[in-house]
Amino acid sequence: MPLREKQARDAAQDTPPGILADHQIRDLAGVSGMIAPFVEKQQRAGNISYGLSSYGYDARCSDEFMIFTNVDNAVVDPKNFSQQSFVERKTDVCVIPPNSFVLTRTVEYFRIPEDVLVICLGKSTYARCGLIVNVTPLEPGWEGHVTLEISNTTPLPAKVYANEGVAQFLFFKGSSPCEVSYADRAGKYMGQRGVTLPKL
């Protein structure tokens, strides 16, 4: 193992519990591929910002969107969710209908260490426009593209921009690795790629 990678790994193991800072996130991205592709510095010029921040990472949404529509008057059932409730689009700008939502995914693929828990928060730029980003925590040992749900709470159509920042991820190191990780229990969303619908 190259010296720099060994030093970064050892530093990560010696890190006390708490929220990870930019240099610690960078070290984990380099050693374990925790975030790929990884952008080491916030990118802003004409974009909704993305990349490494002081105590987190602003991820981008991809150009793959599944827009919710109720043309068939279906009932939303998390135990039997119909893909017919969505219209699929591959586009640089997605327009979410009023009082509806869209599913998309992060550009980045995440590999979460077994002693780290990740929390997602929507970016304030979208929140100030009435767009709410929701994602459950990324559990220790999980990996995959993150499926994001973006709700348009306004009575007007609203735009979401692909390949730009959509949500910030905060990384919390636990006091020790968990006994049973998401990978150990073969979680149903392990290794997901692309936009993933609810599974039972």
Image: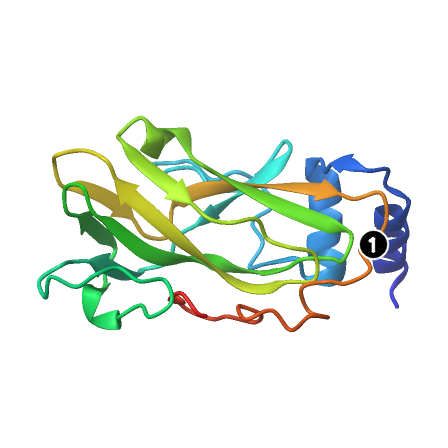
Q: Dot 1 corresponds to which residue?
A: 177
What residue is at 25 percent from the left and 55 percent from the top?
92
> In which quarter of the view is residue 127 placed?
top left
Label total for image? 1
Can residue 47 be seen by looking at this rendering? Answer: no
82 left or right, relative to 193: left
- Image location of residue 19, percent across then percent down: 71, 35
Three-letter amino acid code of the residue under disc 1: Pro
- Image location of residue 9, percent across then percent down: 85, 55
76 left or right, relative to 17: left
Q: In this view of the protein, which residue sits in the foreground, 71 or 149? A: 71
Q: In this view of the protein, which residue sits in the foreground, 171 or 186? A: 186
In the structure shown, which secondary structural element does the residue marked by tag 1 occupy? loop
What residue is at 27 percent from the left and 31 percent from the top?
130
What residue is at 67 percent from the left and 57 percent from the top?
112
What residue is at 80 percent from the left and 55 percent from the top?
178
Which residue is situated farthest in the left direction here?
71
- Image location of residue 102, percent across then percent down: 27, 53
> In which quarter of the view is residue 133 placed?
top left
149 left or right, relative to 88: right
